[in-house]
Amino acid sequence: MTKKKIFIAVGILLVVSIVVILNTKRVMTSYEYPEKMPKDFNFIVKLNSNEYCINTYDNTFSKSINWDKDTIKNYKISDSEKRRVYQLIKEYNIIKYPNYFTPPTHINVSPSFDYYFKSTFDSINVEINWKFNTESKEKEAILLKDFLYRIFDNILKEEQIKNLPETVRLAM
């Protein structure tokens, strides 16, 4: 084989590999969620560039006080609240979102906060990084942001969370 043929073969193999890797997430769009919350269910949610973070893998809640300081506390979410979050995952069919979500329409807003979601259920890992165009008015963007904020609905009302120091960081 000539160097040219080897180069072409390696190039084709590389392109096929990239296409397979990028399309792996799409296979999961038709996933049938278990009716009951799986025993391995855990999640991490970060809102507004880590202003708030819930991590059920290590049972912590963190709140940014300023750009350099976070308050992190041990926090075990209740089983009923965990079931509620699992139902939200099913309701919003969160598995359909790509790992790196960027809505197609562009709206310039500064600052634009980023969002993060990671979950394990039924031995499946789902991860969504949303760093760009987070103020989009696209339907899927609005739904994802609504999903992420609804996770915090009840948690932010709890006394132990309400009693954390106020955030004093200013947007740059």
Image (cartoon, grey):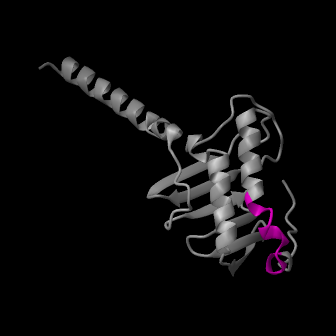
Which of the 4 quarters of the picture holds residue 135? top right
User: Bounds of the magenta span?
Assistant: 151-161
Q: Considering depth in this image, is 119 or 61 the residue closer to the camera? A: 119
Image height check: is 32 above or below 55? above
> Residue 41, position in %: x, y?
54, 64
In the drawing, does residue 155 fall left or right of residue 13? Answer: right
Q: Quadrant of the N terminus?
A: top left
Q: Extreme front residue here?
A: 35
Point 81% across, 69% down: residue: 156
Point 75% across, 32% down: residue: 138
Q: Extreme left residue here?
A: 1
Q: Considering depth in this image, is 64 or 92 the residue closer to the camera? A: 92
> Residue 102, position in %: x, y?
65, 37
Image height check: is 160 above or below 51? below
| Residue 158 falls inside the magenta stretch | yes
Residue 45 visible (yes or no): no
| Residue 148 falls inside the magenta stretch | no
Q: Main secondary structure of the magenta part?
A: helix
> Residue 141, position in %: x, y?
73, 39
